[in-house]
Image: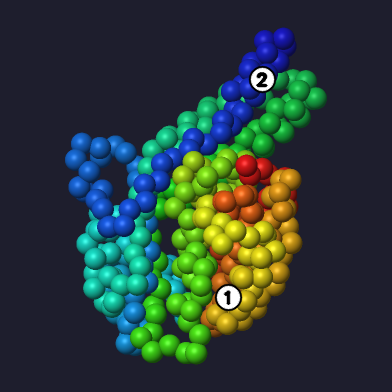
Amino acid sequence: MEDTRADSLSMKSASEPAPIAASEAVPDDSPGESPAETGGEESRKRIYNGSAGIVVEDPEETRTSLETLTLDAGGYVESSYSEYMELRVPAEIFSDFFDTVLSLGKVEFSRVETRDVTDAFADIQRRLATAEETRSRLYVLLEKSTDPSERAQILREIGRLTEEIESLKQQTAIMESRIAFSRITVQLIPRIQGDYSRGDIPFPWIASLDPLYPAGDKIKGRVSLDLGMDFAVFSKDSVFMAEDSDGMQILISTVPNNPLGDGEFWQRALVYHLSPFYAKVDEMNLSFGDKELLGVELVSKDRKPFKYFIGVVADGRKLHVVEIFSPNDEEKFKPLYKLFAEGELK
């Protein structure tokens, strides 16, 4: 029985998950290369994201055109709101399709981002293979064991590994989907606007906030955040970016703290300038580790509204912006707020 216990201990050690490797994000102002154009790097796994704001005469007519174009291209509309559309198109046509989107109106802004997730994907696959191999060996041990307490211990470990395997398979599916289908977020801006528009907001980073795109191009700091097994983490070093299978996203980036203000100043600015665009605005006073995280929780005016949290951590001349997006306004952000409190941002 000593060999059995020794094998069990060594296998439990082998199944412990390693940290997900950070990936690279390369923001760009032009559509850049699609996967088909990357020459000898076909083995690299990349995610392509695009975001644009276009001024159009008739937003609804443009929305219909975009839906038709997306479906004809073999893609799908992931979500559609009063101001935003989230489109998914095959990665190999991303660049050409993004150009088509920009041609439908006057371009107010456009951004393209390429994330290399090769290392992150490989790490998940390694952890999955290790967990599956360990579980198989535990099943063999279970068949040989006659000791009731040892069998119970092995069964508990098999149960834990089964949960881990299912979670890793889910993370794999999320990544494979994001690699195969690029995301394009389109903000439809009517040519004739009301008394108050985003162009009237005096703070550029607030004016350009997009629920599906990070406020800044990079994170100037280190984020330590344990999201468990439900989220696939796509990037940690450039912009912190994580997503679950239901489309909930967590984005953490950094923008200049200009004009220089504390958390309360920026919280008031968010409330004042974003209230006209949302059905519900609640102030949130939270923490990110030992730092104050002040922000707002928003619910859109759509028939099927989304939920959006924006929080700030003032750090001298830097302003760390924490964002959560959920396509379902009933989603509770409280568990994530608790994780922020247990995390670290510095």
- Residue 189 visible within the image: yes
Task: Reply above or below: 170 against 160.
Answer: below
Q: Which of 215 and 165 is in front in this view?
A: 215
Residue beneath the point at 53% across and 52% down: 254
Residue 217 in the image, given as x and y percentages of width and height: 44, 53
Q: Is mark 1 on a helix, strand or loop?
A: helix
Q: Which of 160 and 36 is in front in this view?
A: 36
45 vs 33, left or right, is right
Q: In which quarter of the image is residue 163?
A: top right
The quarter of the rendered structure image containing the C terminus is top right
Three-letter code, disc 2:
Ser
Distance between mark 2 and mark 1 Cα atoms: 56 Å
Residue beneath the point at 44% across and 40% down: 23
Residue 8 circle label: 2
Q: How many marks?
A: 2
Disc 1 target residue: 274
Three-letter code, disc 1:
Leu
Mark 2, other Cα within 10 Å: few <14 / some 14–19 / many ≥20: many
Q: Is mark 2 on a helix, strand or loop?
A: helix
303 vs 97, left or right, is right
Mark 1, other Cα within 10 Å: few <14 / some 14–19 / many ≥20: many
Furthest-front residue in this view: 259
Q: Quadrant of residue 103?
A: bottom left
Task: Reply above or below: 167 against 76.
Answer: above
The quarter of the rendered structure image containing the N terminus is top right
20 vs 24, left or right, is right
- Residue 250 visible within the image: no
Residue 200 circle label: none
314 vs 303, left or right, is right
Residue beneath the point at 59% across and 67% down: 308
Residue beneath the point at 48% across and 38% down: 22
